[in-house]
Image (tube, rainbow, N blue to C red):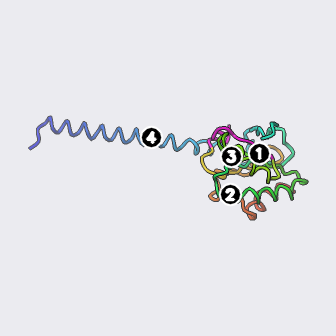
């Protein structure tokens, strides 16, 4: 038969375990929820957060300076196989639609020591590329999956939120569905 002390100790341990589980779940949830929180603050039809691309050749291109253009922000890395497949498709699309006001800005998440590989990839692209330097992209949040893309309309409004897409990479069909109507 259990004593009153044993019962109190068992209850205290259960209570402590319950509290620790809850605190641990909250901490993990908060950490995992960071990108989700940022994703929730990015709403299609609302102003797109400003972002500046510092290109490999030293120029600065700000999304705010591209008003009047349709802008695609693409986040990628040389080690990301889906990115390497997507980039030529996006580059060809950007070339075909440049005269309609399309601008693409490429943000590489590679480390600075991978600069030669980034330059090699960028040399085959029709749009400017720069190293992001950090997984944090201002109002777009922490870039936690690759590739991820965002589209901004001519008025500076977010037209496509890459966090909302189950298939994050561009396909011809997705470009035609999302970007082409904005170019008309």
Question: According to the image, label 3 marks what residue?
Answer: 43
Name the N-terminal-most of marks 2 and 1.
Answer: 1
Q: Secondary structure at mark 1?
A: strand
Residue 96, position as x, y percentages in the image: 86, 59
Name the N-terminal-most of marks 1 and 3.
Answer: 3
Question: According to the image, label 2 marks what residue?
Answer: 169
In the image, what residue occupies the spot 76% across and 61% down? 177
Asked which quadrant contains residue 124, the reply is bottom right
In the image, what residue occupies the spot 58% across and 44% down? 35
Q: Nearer the viewer, mark 3 or mark 4?
A: 4
Q: Nearer the viewer, mark 2 or mark 1?
A: 1
C-alpha distance separating marks 4 and 2: 31 Å
| Neighbours of disc 1 within 10 Å: few (<14), some (14-19), many (20+) | many
Q: Nearer the viewer, mark 2 or mark 3?
A: 2
Is residue 133 one of those drawn in magenta?
A: yes
Question: According to the image, label 1 marks what residue?
Answer: 129
Q: Which residues are magenta?
A: 128-142
Residue contact at pointers 2 and 3, CB within 8 angstroms: no
Q: Main secondary structure of the magenta part?
A: loop
Q: Secondary structure at mark 2?
A: loop
Residue 173 to residue 139: above or below = below
C-alpha distance separating marks 1 and 3: 25 Å
Q: Is residue 97 left or right of residue 81?
A: right
Q: Nearer the viewer, mark 4 or mark 2?
A: 2
Question: According to the image, label 4 marks what residue?
Answer: 26
In the image, what residue occupies the spot 84% across and 51% down? 102
Residue 108, position as x, y percentages in the image: 70, 45
Q: Nearer the viewer, mark 1 or mark 4?
A: 1
Is residue 175 one of those drawn in magenta?
A: no
In the depicted view, which residue is nearer to us: 140 or 76?
76
| Neighbours of disc 2 within 10 Å: few (<14), some (14-19), many (20+) | many
C-alpha distance separating marks 3 and 4: 25 Å
């Amino acid at each position: 038969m259990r004593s009153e002390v044993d019962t109190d100790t068992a209850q205290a341990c259960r209570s402590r375990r319950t509290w620790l589980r809850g605190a641990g779940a909250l901490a993990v949830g908060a950490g995992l929820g960071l990108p989700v929180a940022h994703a929730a603050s990015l709403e299609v039809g609302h102003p797109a957060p400003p972002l500046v691309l510092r290109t490999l050749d030293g120029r600065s291109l700000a999304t705010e300076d591209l008003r009047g253009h349709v802008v695609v922000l693409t986040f990628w890395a040389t080690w990301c196989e889906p990115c390497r497949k997507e980039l030529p498709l996006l580059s060809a699309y950007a070339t075909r639609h440049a005269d309609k006001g399309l601008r693409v800005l490429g943000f590489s998440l590679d480390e600075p020591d991978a600069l030669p590989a980034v330059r090699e990839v960028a040399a085959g692209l029709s749009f400017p590329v720069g190293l992001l330097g950090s997984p944090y992209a201002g109002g777009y949040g922490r870039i936690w999956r690759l590739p991820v893309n965002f589209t901004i309309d001519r008025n500076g409004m977010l037209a496509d939120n890459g966090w909302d897409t189950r298939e994050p990479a561009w396909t011809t069909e997705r470009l035609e569905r999302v970007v082409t109507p904005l170019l008309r």
